[in-house]
Amino acid sequence: MRDRFDYGQDPVKTLSGSLMRAYECDPMTADAEFLLTKAMYKAITGREQERDADVLCYQIRQSFPPGELSPQEALDIGYELAMRWTKGRHAFFVVSHADRPHAHVHIYYNSTALDCTRKFRNFFYSSFALRRLSDRVCLEHELSVIQNPKLHSKGKFRHYGEWLGANRKPSFKEQLRAAMDAALSEQPADLPAFLALLQEAGIEVIHGRGGVLSFRLPGQERATRWRGSTLGEGYGPEEVRAILEGRAPARPAGGAGPQRKINLVIDIQQRMAQGKGAGYEHWAKLYNLKQMAAALQFLQENGLTDYDLLSEKTEAAVDQAHTLAGELLAVEEALSRTSALMGAVVEYAKTRPVFDGYKAARYSRKYLAAHEEELAAYRAARSTMNEILDGAKLPKMEKLKQERRELAERKKALTAQYRAAQKSMRELVAVKGNIDHLLHVTGGREDKEQDR
């Protein structure tokens, strides 16, 4: 760390230290402070990593085109990026170098949190999340971003661990998360099918007490217990079951983390007329600026910089979501009818002998009083069957079971498609609403909010 920090704090590059900013640390003693937090982390948690595997600090480099901004302005941008990336939970310092034609900064942040109870988790594809955040900050400050970032210069894109070579392979947790994403991308029917795909990928599935599952990869000594707190958000048992059951959209294999939701901008003049103060106005301006930057980034990433194309895509997304919603509703109604018919058939078969006895007793009041509940269930089941069949012939039970299975599978597939279409529709509607507000397109902002 001292070697890296000395390079970043070079007086020639930083104009005698004037181009440095720090958060919760002193750049001159940052190496000692970072090491001290490691000792406190061990004392508080009792956990200690192997020396060769322990990460002491992380470094981020951010560069700008020549002439776009001064080294001091680059320092401010880098500080904002560091604060938003660490969320103020890790000590860091930023240095800006003025020895090159292009302004650039180096950000060094402690891997151990300020409270010394946890460490930064360098999650899978974190570089993509960092790039998106950097682009967002630059767009908010009206700076340029790389429109089409190239992947690895030599052939197929490789994970950072592969790029470093055999000395730095992806961790077992990263490999397990990637294998889970790949298995989910094949849309397994249920949990056993999902586990079977993991086993085909060479992962050992261990069944423990109480139904607890653990995974062991080739070469891994200690199995990894399957829980969200271990593997990270989105990879716990409940999240995976939600994807399998169609209650949540599946992640693409090797995909990046979740993106920030884009909301409609605030009509500041309308809110000020309602009695909001100057503090709210300042906050709303910053909020609108961030939402506009998010909308612009969305348009650039999806190739929708033409307004007519944006309108067309938005209308198509709305129609697609409404169509899938109608199909899903029809399938749910058919599934409900089939399930109700199957239940009525079972109840009818159970109570029919009671009714036959009632009939043989010549509709005796005494028999009726003794079997009133069973006879009421018989009449209700018969009424349900007549209402659902509407004169049609009663199918065999095996055919009803097969129909219900097919409808359930169709519902699961449609639910996943509808959730994805609904998310796409909401993003496009919010982005188009923000662009309309920016361009002062007529049509009634209140109507747009009501429709949304």
Image (cartoon, rainbow, N blue to C red):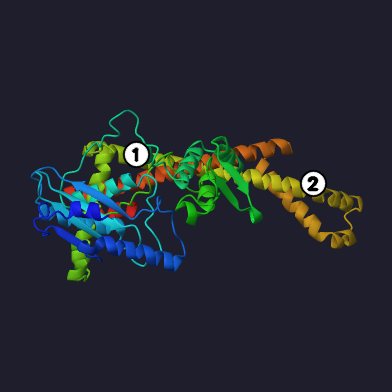
**Which residue is most to the top?**
155
Q: Foreground: 168 or 434?
A: 168
Q: Can residue 220 be seen here?
A: yes
In the drawing, does residue 74 fall left or right of residue 412? left
Of tags 1 and 2, which is closer to the observer? 1
Residue 160 percent coordinates (x, y): 35, 40
The residue at 51%/36% (across/down) is 186
Amino acid identity at mark 1? Leu
Residue 279, located in which quarter of the rendered image? bottom left
Say which element carries label 2: helix
Q: Is residue 334 left or right of residue 122?
A: right
State the residue at coordinates (20%, 62%).
Answer: 28
| The quadrant where residue 33 appears | bottom left
Name the one closer to the observer, 241 or 266.
Answer: 241
Specify whether 448 is left or right of 388. Answer: left
| For marks 1 and 2 on the same chain, the one whose residue lies earlier in the sequence | 1
Q: Are marks 1 and 2 in contact (CB under 8 Å)?
A: no
Residue 19, quarter of the rendered image: bottom left
21 sits to left or right of 402: left
Nearest to the observer: residue 353 or residue 411: 411
Q: Where is residue 377 in the image (x, y as percent from the top left)?
A: 76, 55
Residue 359 higher or lower than 92, as above or below: above
Q: Which residue was labeled with disc 1?
A: 164
Query: What label sits on residue 349 in the rendered view?
Result: 2
Looking at the image, is 246 positioned above or below residue 50?
A: above
| Numbered badge on residue 354 | none
**x and y, in percent, of residue 249 in the image:** 46, 45
Q: Check disc 2 and give the amino acid type.
A: Ala
